[in-house]
Image (cartoon, rainbow, N blue to C red):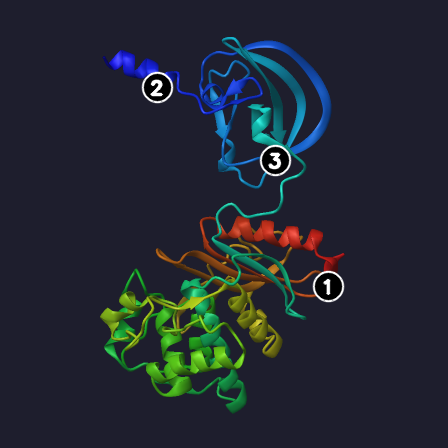
Amino acid sequence: MKKQVIKLLATVTFGLVGGFTVSQVNSQAAYKTVSVKKVTKAAYHKASNSGAFYNQAHTKKIVNLKTHPYTTYYVTKEAVMKNGSKKAVFYYAKSASGIGGWVWNKYLTKGKSPFGLKYAKSYLAMDAKTGEVLASHNGNTQRLVASTGKLMTIYLAVQKAEKENAWNKTVSVAGSGLRSMGLSSAVGGFQFKTGHKYTVKQLYDAALIESSNNAAIALGRWVSGSNAKFIKKMNAQAAAWGLSSKTKFVSASGLENDDLSPYGYWASGSYTAGNEVSAKDLATIARKLINDYPDVLKQSKLTSMKTDGQTLTNANRLLKGKTYYSSDLNVDGLKTGYTPRAGLCLVATSQKAGKHRLITVVLNDQNEFTETNSLMKHVYKTADVYK
């Protein structure tokens, strides 16, 4: 009985196209090559999320097309292949990086692939001088943004420090919650010693370079007098800049509410898990910070520094001397972020000689550095302002 069921399932088809059924093309039965010819090299990309590359006999699958969604393949051969009594046309195609093999011609469509990032749920590129959006995918969708949300905290802290010439002013870091955060491997970074005093500059460096959560909260309390008042100030500033009414801040650090709760920093009355900001609004905040206080770039480009006997390490691996640095891009900031729910996030910036500064944002990514590099290179190559 089982053999009969299997035999019946094997004969189910999903429509005849070009001589083959979809079920036949997706099978790994051996194919007979009827004829092969070389063709003029031409660009193609995937027609849908269906299909895969195989070896010529179709006994081995090489890769599914959907795993490389924004890839251009170059066809150099065409073959008529036979499976049973059915014939169809197959292409031999490979990408510039060597991905490819034999694929049913119906799974490809002519022309180069449109640009896109494989992993980022949202991305956006913005001209830092004009605010023009140069590339975007889900750029207006609010998402959890992890520590990239610290850019608002840093802006408001720098604003007060500059206005009051308060960089060397000491800030209260009282409270067991802030000290406990510094000792936590999950949410810590900068350690507050009991009875020790820290300057605005030290906390600023810790928040920007090390992405210290307790330093960011301490800065917020210094700016507004309390954590709750500072969160209100963050949202008021967002409204004053004309950011989306859906963009909400509940945290000076970027941590989500339930991560902050054990340390006493849950945002009372909050109706969202954490800071929810769109890629466009994050780029706008970064633009305001860079244009109003350009000295931030002197710090954001540092891979590490020491303060209060502690080493601050920058997690931005696009910076000079780091793994993903590209001399062609010369990234000099700005802020990384990660929580399990927000995914990998990055607000980055670079400037080519004689050109406008570029700001990019990737949110909920799996490879934020590689994809930021790809986004920057695409914009520099295609945007009129950089030509």
> Label 3: which residue?
45
SS state under label 1: loop
* Between discs 3 and 2, the one toward the N terminus: 2
> Label 2: which residue?
9
Q: Nearer the viewer, mark 3 or mark 1?
A: 3
Is 372 situated above or below 148?
Answer: above
Q: Amino acid at mark 1?
A: Lys
Q: Which numbered circle lies on residue 168?
A: none
* Between discs 3 and 1, the one toward the N terminus: 3
Q: Is residue 302 in sight in this rendering?
A: no
* Between discs 1 and 2, the one toward the N terminus: 2
SS state under label 2: helix
Q: Position of residue 317 (x, y in %)?
A: 51, 54
Q: Please tell me how crowded label 2 is: few (under 14), some (14-19), or many (20+) other residues with Cα within 10 Å.
A: few
* The residue positioned farthest toward the bottom in the image shown: 164
- Dividing the picture into quadrants, the one containing residue 17 is top right
What residue is drawn where x is 47% and y is 69%?
208
What residue is drawn where x is 57% and y is 35%?
47
Spatial distance from mark 3 to mark 1, Cα to Cα? 32 Å
Q: Position of residue 141 (x, y in %)?
A: 48, 61
Locate the C terminus by quadrant.
Answer: bottom right
Q: Amino acid at mark 2?
A: Leu
Is 23 situated above or below 184?
Answer: above
What residue is drawn where x is 26% and y is 80%?
175
SS state under label 3: strand
Q: Please tell me how crowded label 1 is: few (under 14), some (14-19), or many (20+) other residues with Cα within 10 Å.
A: few
11 left or right of 17?
A: left
> Label 1: which residue?
355
